[in-house]
Image: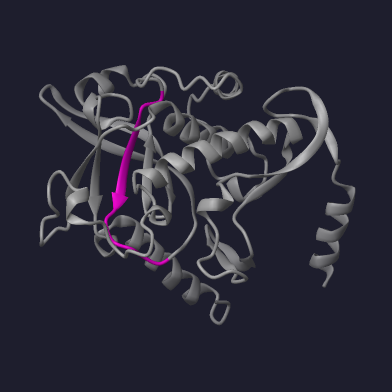
Amino acid sequence: MASKERKKSKKRHAPKTGLCGLLRIEGAYAKAHLLPKALTSPSISGERFIEAGRGNRPIRRFTSWYDHQLVTRDGEKILSEIDTAGIAELRKHKLVWSGWGNKNKLRTSDFEVDSDPESGIGMRLIEGVDVDKIRLFFLSLLWRSLKTKIKEFSYLPNVAVDLDRIGEMLINRDSGAPHYHPILLDQMSTLGFVHNHSPTLQEIELAFDEGPMRVPFYRFYMQGLVAHVYPADSLEVFKKMSAMFVGGHEKLWVYTRKFENTRQFAEAREAILNTSRVWPGAI
């Protein structure tokens, strides 16, 4: 009970106006989703997500993470426009589940290389992608995730990300050169269970002729799509595998995997099992 009263008190005393994190001008704050609601809502209206992991007791939420003091109404308008355009582009090219209609898997005609029967790995080659819309969308998610001060995102470190520069790019609708924070997409080729996953900082070892290279990247997941956002200074990596990055080739190359064969499924299942063990009866 005391905890609920503290939360109510905190909400009552939270400033309703202040400096916009994006526009850097004073104004009335707006509720800003850190991951867009359109791609992070429960599959059944009225249901609640269980927020768990990172050692915290599970709680139930009706929506994904949001920040009441990140941007003003004018700043949120910019983010919302970027979200709307980016999500429409992802759905148009069937890169997220909500672009599949009532289907539970991609069609054979969606693949350039058919899925391997054993591994489930395939390849899509997509024409006519609006690179600017997709890059701006994921750069905006990177900006929000590192700019927010809410405790649920406090675990995520800023590793040489220039938030001021990205903020200016978002304001000017400038997606930048494809090798600036290059973005790689993977997707699930089969429908899985709906769940939200907060962004993480991970590392991958890339094998090149001159030897392996370890590179950090920010990983975003939503609706069956995984985006890897690499460091700003990844020109060397970009040159070696440019075709794999958004905007690095005239067509977009996307690896696909069956949901049940993905790291995403394994991590979600492990999180559920760990939460049930540490907090029995909480979910």
Residue under the point 53% across and 55% down: 40
- Indicate whether 38 appears above or below 182: below
**Is residue 282 part of the magenta span, yes or no?**
no
Q: Relative to the observer, which residue lies in front, 167 or 92?
A: 92
- Indicate whether 220 appears above or below 52: above
Q: Is residue 17 toward the left or the right of residue 77 in the image?
A: right
Residue under the point 61% across and 38% down: 80
**Is residue 190 part of the magenta span, yes or no?**
yes
Task: Identify the magenta region.
Answer: 181-193
Residue under the point 64% across and 31% down: 78
Query: Considering the image in quadrants, where does the C terminus appear?
Result: bottom right
Query: Considering the image in quadrants, where does the N terminus appear?
Result: bottom right
In the image, residue 199 lies at what x, y percent?
48, 46
Q: Relative to the observer, which residue lies in front, 157 or 117?
A: 117
Coloring basis for residues: one colour
Q: Relative to the observer, which residue lies in front, 209 or 24?
A: 24
- Indicate whether 36 appears above or below 44: above
The number of numbered badges drawn on the structure is: 0
In the image, residue 72 lies at what x, y percent?
75, 34
In the image, residue 241 lies at what x, y percent?
21, 26
Q: Is residue 152 toward the left or the right of residue 21 in the image?
A: left
Q: Is residue 114 toward the left or the right of residue 18 in the image?
A: left
In the image, residue 108 lies at what x, y percent?
17, 55
Which image quarter: residue 248? top left
Which image quarter: residue 224? bottom left
